[in-house]
Image (tube, rainbow, N blue to C red):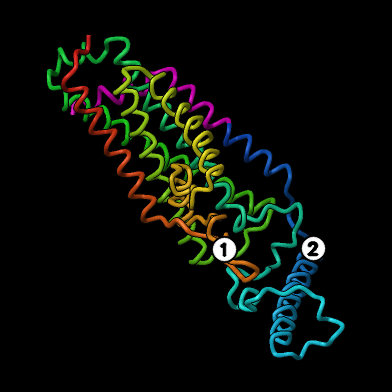
């Protein structure tokens, strides 16, 4: 317990951690201030016009679906035969759409919390992922580079216990900070929606969806923190973690992606870590495969394929586990001086 308390004090005393906290608060403050300045409470007339526009948009969707069905049945007037319709009329069926137009879609200049909460949460998760990775890498990297770990081992000469305590303390601190930050962040924008915008439809389905994104985002933050910690442990320096990520982004995400597109490899996005991150965070990610429709001729071809959160999480967990185990093995065996 004394070791955990000591590690928490060391983590909080680091200037880099304090700087990242300041940047975190600054980024949130700028985002909230910008949103507040660009929003206003809708008037009764604006709400009435928005409801009318939404009803008109839904009516237009019904008309387009019916005209597509009429064309399939041969009931479309000759002068309308030039209109474009998809091969499958179910694509236009309003019942099959993910969502129908609502009044809040037609409120320009109004911050609608129900519509903007999820994109704002994605921004928060992205910042916390960066925060966790950098703090995780600098936390252990600075100790290894300065000899602080060696001094700590003189007091508690159990390498794996010391490294495990450092990692556990780091993950617990990042998780606690992420929970506090996300609660304050969403509460601030909820208040903006109430006072200077429009709350929108905040039903149980909305909160369940937002909670699912938040939970997946927290898992991603913890994985990024553990990855930064593991890479810095393997490289014995913070810059090793940063260099590894930069090299991966340039060599694989950019270079290998370009090569795979040149050779027309099937489904190249499944080999990219960023694709799995997106699939995990959003629940599913859809990509286009140009090779899928190469021999389809003039017929209809669906060239899209999907990555779901299950396989994406398995890839992220496997990568983190491999690097984490390698870091502990290297820390246990090598000379730290």
Q: Is residue 307 above or below residue 35?
A: below
- Residue drawn 44% across and 42% down? 273
In reply to whether residue 85 is colored magenta, the answer given is no
Across and down, in percent, residue 148 comes to 27, 12
- Which residue was labeled with disc 2? 46
Mark 2 or mark 1, whichever is nearer to me: 1
Across and down, in percent, residue 81 comes to 81, 81
Q: Is residue 124 left or right of residue 84?
A: left
Quadrant in the picture for residue 179: top left
Q: Mark 2: which secondary structure?
A: helix
- Residue drawn 58% across and 33% down? 27
Nearer to the camera, 185 or 307:
307
Q: So how many labels did they put on this image?
A: 2
Nearer to the camera, 288 or 120:
288
- Which residue was labeled with disc 1? 295
Across and down, in percent, residue 252 comes to 47, 35
Nearer to the camera, 260 or 159:
260
CB under 8 Å between discs 2 and 1? no
Question: Which quadrant is the C terminus positioned in?
Answer: top left
Range drawn in magenta: 1-26
Quadrant in the picture for residue 2: top left
Predominant secondary structure in magenta?
Answer: helix
Among the two numbered marks 2 and 1 on one chain, the one whose residue lies closer to the N terminus: 2
Q: Is residue 321 above or below residue 163?
A: below
Across and down, in percent, residue 73 comes to 70, 90
Measured in 3D between alpha carbons, the distance from the residue under mark 2 to the one under mark 1, in whole angstroms, is: 51 Å
Q: Is residue 10 left or right of residue 62?
A: left
Q: Is residue 337 left or right of residue 110?
A: left
Q: Residues within 10 Å of mark 1 (few under 14, many from 20)?
A: few
Residue 262: give its label: none
Q: Residues within 10 Å of mark 2 (few under 14, many from 20)?
A: some
In reply to whether residue 10 is colored magenta, the answer given is yes
């Amino acid at each position: 317990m004394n070791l955990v308390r000591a590690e928490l004090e060391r983590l909080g005393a680091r200037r880099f951690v304090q700087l990242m906290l300041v940047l975190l608060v600054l980024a949130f403050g700028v985002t909230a201030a910008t949103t507040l300045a660009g929003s206003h409470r809708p008037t009764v007339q604006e709400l009435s016009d928005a409801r009318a526009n939404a009803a008109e948009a839904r009516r237009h969707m019904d008309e387009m679906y019916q005209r597509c069905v009429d064309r399939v049945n041969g009931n479309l007037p000759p002068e309308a035969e030039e209109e474009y319709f998809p091969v499958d009329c179910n694509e236009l069926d309003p019942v099959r759409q993910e969502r129908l137009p609502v009044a809040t879609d037609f409120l320009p200049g109004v911050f609608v919390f129900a519509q903007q909460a999820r994109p704002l949460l994605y921004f928060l998760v992205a910042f916390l992922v960066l925060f966790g990775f950098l703090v995780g890498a600098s936390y252990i990297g600075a100790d290894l580079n300065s000899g602080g770990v060696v001094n700590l081992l003189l007091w508690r000469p159990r390498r794996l216990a010391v490294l495990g305590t450092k990692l556990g303390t780091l993950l617990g601190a990042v998780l606690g900070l992420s929970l506090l930050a996300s609660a304050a962040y969403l509460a601030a924008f909820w208040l903006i929606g109430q006072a200077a915008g429009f709350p929108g439809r905040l039903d149980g389905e909305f909160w369940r969806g937002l909670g699912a994104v938040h939970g997946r985002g927290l898992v991603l933050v913890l994985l990024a923190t553990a990855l930064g910690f593991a890479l810095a442990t393997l490289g014995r320096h913070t810059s090793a973690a940063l260099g590894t990520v930069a090299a991966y982004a340039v060599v694989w995400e950019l270079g290998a992606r370009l090569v795979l597109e040149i050779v027309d490899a099937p489904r190249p996005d499944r080999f990219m870590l960023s694709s799995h991150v997106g699939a995990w965070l959003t629940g599913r990610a859809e990509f286009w495969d140009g090779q899928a429709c190469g021999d389809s001729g003039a017929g209809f071809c669906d060239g899209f394929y999907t990555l779901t959160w299950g396989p994406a999480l398995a890839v992220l967990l496997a990568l983190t586990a491999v690097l984490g185990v390698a870091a502990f093995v290297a820390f246990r065996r090598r000379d730290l001086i």
